[in-house]
Image (cartoon, rainbow, N blue to C red):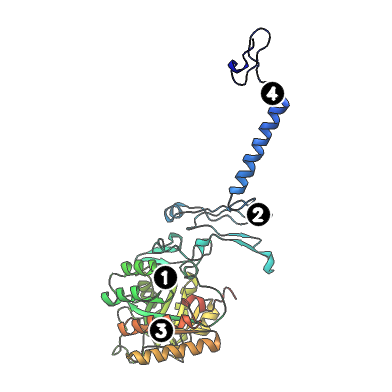
Amino acid sequence: MNKEIERPLGQDRRSGGRPRRLRFSPGAVAATVACLAIIAVAGAIALRPRPFHQAPEIVVSTPEAAASASKPPVGMAPSGQAMSTSGQTGPHIIHVNPDSTEPKGTIVIRDPSTLGQNLRMAHLPDRALIEQSEMGPLPIRSIDGRRPVDVYARPWSGTRGARVAIVIGGLGLSQTGTQYAIQKLPGPVTLAFAPQGNSLDRWMRDARQSGHELLMQVPFEPFDYPNVNPGRNTLTVEASPAENLRSLHWALSRITNYTGIMNYMGARFVADENVMEPIMKDLARRGLLYLDDGTSARSVAPQLALKDGVPFAEGDMTIDTSHDRGDILKKLDQLEATARAKGFAIGTGSAFQVTVDAVADWIGEAVKRGVEIVPVTAVMTDPEKG
């Protein structure tokens, strides 16, 4: 009697007493493997954040690597294919068909971090933009043509609307006042350092890491000099061009990572084309901005900047001729009205606590009214860019 219930589950007995084995045809095995492969590929594609799009290559070089690079950058291949560069700090910018004059003829592939320096690295100078001199490091164009005015510029939105640039000078003269200004003022406010100040490199690092664009103030001869004295190494009308350039370079060597210079006083000096011309030519060679504070109607800086190819900006008003908070706020409101009328305005002031507090509070309200606070490079005229 067959006892079916006693047979092992899933087995049958043949003649000979051996259990039956399951058999799979080669076609069935291949079909199973193919199905599993299709499922695996579909799952991998579904889990990708950007299906069918290859991530762009980002090439990063450190300041140390840039310092060791000795070869000049490689240009475009004849076919228009982008080629990598060397001797350049930060992520590379690859230009495709850069010679085309049509808007659609140029494609720029840009890593987002190139829209201004990473704040953690902003205090580190680009070694390719430094010329070593007996006085110290001087700003200079890099071999590949990059300029300090571009590399150290703070990014802005690029949109149309009322733009206000505020430049606060005198940084470095007072330790507590400098620290307060750096901490209190929003990043878009441009800070200008006095070359006679102390601990300038420290304050430069703090300011850059706080997001500020920087200028260097250069003392120019005012009327009634030396009774009215802007300070050490003032550039004067009576000095030779070589002497004035030496005084200029002393000021330029005091810090790094700035976009240009602005005059400190200098009503007599900026009105004399013969003494201003060598200064402007040197700024053009170095790729620096010149900001005229706008206090002298006789300044020859605007026409010389255009002639010599110097990025240029001119202040519309000094906001703290009075140290009364109410008066400063009124000047700032006037600055906003000017910006709404012509598109932008530039105000200059000094790092007095009352000025810093008034500017910080006013900016908070002005932004709500649709005013964009921008660095001075956002409102400059650049002859090299047309």
Q: Is residue 107 above or below residue 362?
A: above
In the image, residue 317 lies at what x, y percent?
43, 89
Q: Is residue 237 above or below residue 15?
A: below
Judging from the image, what secondary structure is the residue with disc 2 in?
loop
Give whichever of 40, 260 is nearer the camera: 40
Crowding at dot 1, Cα within 10 Å, few <14 / some 14-19 / many 20+, comes out as: many
Q: Residues within 10 Å of mark 3 (few under 14, many from 20)?
A: some
Give the numbered dot on residue 362: 3
Q: Residue at x 59, y 49 (%)?
A: 48
Q: Earlier in the sequence, mark 3 or mark 1?
A: 1
**Residue beneath label 4, please?**
24
Helix, strand or loop at label 4? It is loop
Q: Which label number is shown at residue 258? A: 1
Name the residue that disc number 2 marks: 81
Which sits earlier in the primary sequence, circle 4 or circle 3? 4
- In the image, residue 49 above or below residue 41: below
Amino acid under label 2?
Gln
Q: Residue furthest right?
A: 27
| Disc ID at residue 332 | none
Q: Nearer the viewer, mark 3 or mark 1?
A: 3
- The answer to which of 181 and 171 lies nearer the viewer is 181
Q: Secondary structure at mark 3?
A: helix
Q: Tag 4 or tag 2, which sits nearer the N-term?
A: 4
Q: Amino acid at mark 3?
A: Trp
Q: Position of residue 234 (x, y in %)?
A: 34, 81
Observer able to see residue 101 = no
Give the CA separation, mark 3 to mark 1. 25 Å
- Residue shown at the point (51%, 65%) measured from the top left: 115
For badge 4, the amino acid type reads Phe
Callout 3–callout 1 Cβ contact below 8 Å: no
